[in-house]
Image (spheres, grey):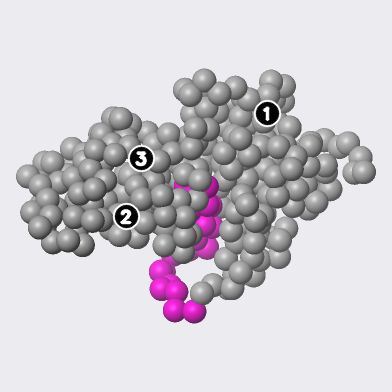
Amino acid sequence: MPSRKRWTRDELTVALGIYHNLTFGQLHGRQRVIIQLAGKLGRTPGSVAMKLCNFASLDPALKMRGIKGLEGASALDRDVWEEFHQKPEEIVPQSREILRQMFEAGPDSELEVLPLEGIKVRKRPLGDTEVLVTTKQRRGQEYFRDAVLNNFGGACGVTGIPVRELLVASHILPWKTHTDERLNVRNGLCLSRLHDAAFDRGLITFDDELRMVISPALKKHFPQQGVAGSFESYEGERLIVPDDAALPELAFLATHRSSIFAKK
């Protein structure tokens, strides 16, 4: 059994990245992702799960839902938490890069944190569109996708479709204009590619109860069966979000709604 040892700042930074890629109910020593991370850190799964539960005690998104973590977070835990959330554009990519190095993910590989399968490294699919972004941005985007998709239980929040290849981590506040919220899981929705496109273009949004609101511009197309089946049947339905998930930030959704209906 690995001996007890102090956590380093780098270890806590990568562990916090994993924390945000799992929901509270998955923070236990039997979780595959935690078992794999523990092996790389030379620690027991139980000790890693305990550290993630310490982080949970610092999480305001969980406190809002009445979920408590495990007391006993150290001063260094608190420092790493503050740094991670005050400088996400800098620290999140660092966390992801450490994780990628642990799992020997090369530059042409994708790393995914999959709660049911573990941490997987795969070659990028052939035909992937290559967007010209820096390595730092790519690491941040990889983290954000896992954080948002896993926060929604790996399924579209509208339809419940669980096919990961068809899902998008949608930004509520646009990536280009809201740099401070780019990597905030509460600025993300897990949507199918179709519903992501509709959300991005202001054809759908969500109210303060997380119910789908459809724009007048899209309703004009309801006589078309394909449009009605994909949207009309979900109007007024609440986003499907796990009980222990971090809920989308309502203020961000209000901003999204105002930008849509200002175009009427």
Q: Quadrant of the N terminus?
A: top right
Residue closer to the observer: 238 or 167: 238
Q: Do the residues under discs 3 and 2 have CB atoms within 8 angstroms?
A: no
Measure the alpha-carbon separation of dots 1 and 2. 34 Å
Which three-letter amino acid code belongs to the residue tagged 2?
A: Asp
Q: Which residue is mark 1?
A: 54
Q: Residue at x 47, y 60 (%)?
A: 163
| Mark 3 or mark 2, earlier in chain | 2
Mark 1 or mark 2, earlier in chain:
1
> Picture quarter containing residue 103?
bottom right
Left or right: 7 as drawn, with respect to 239: right
Q: Residue at x 15, y 46 (%)?
A: 215
Q: Is residue 127 magenta?
A: yes
In the rendered image, is residue 4 in sight?
yes
- Which span is picked out in magenta? 126-150
Disc 1, SS: helix
Which marked residue is nearer to the observer: mark 3 or mark 2? 3
Comes first in the chain, label 3 or label 1: 1
Q: Residue at x 8, y 54 (%)?
A: 220
Inspect the image, locate mark 3, and give the three-letter code of the amino acid beneath it. Leu
- Determine crowd level at label 2: few under 14, some 14-19, many 20+ residues with C-alpha closer than 10 A: many
> Residue beneath label 3, please?
239
Note whether 52 is above or below 192 in the view shown.
above
Q: CA distance from mark 3 to mark 2?
A: 13 Å
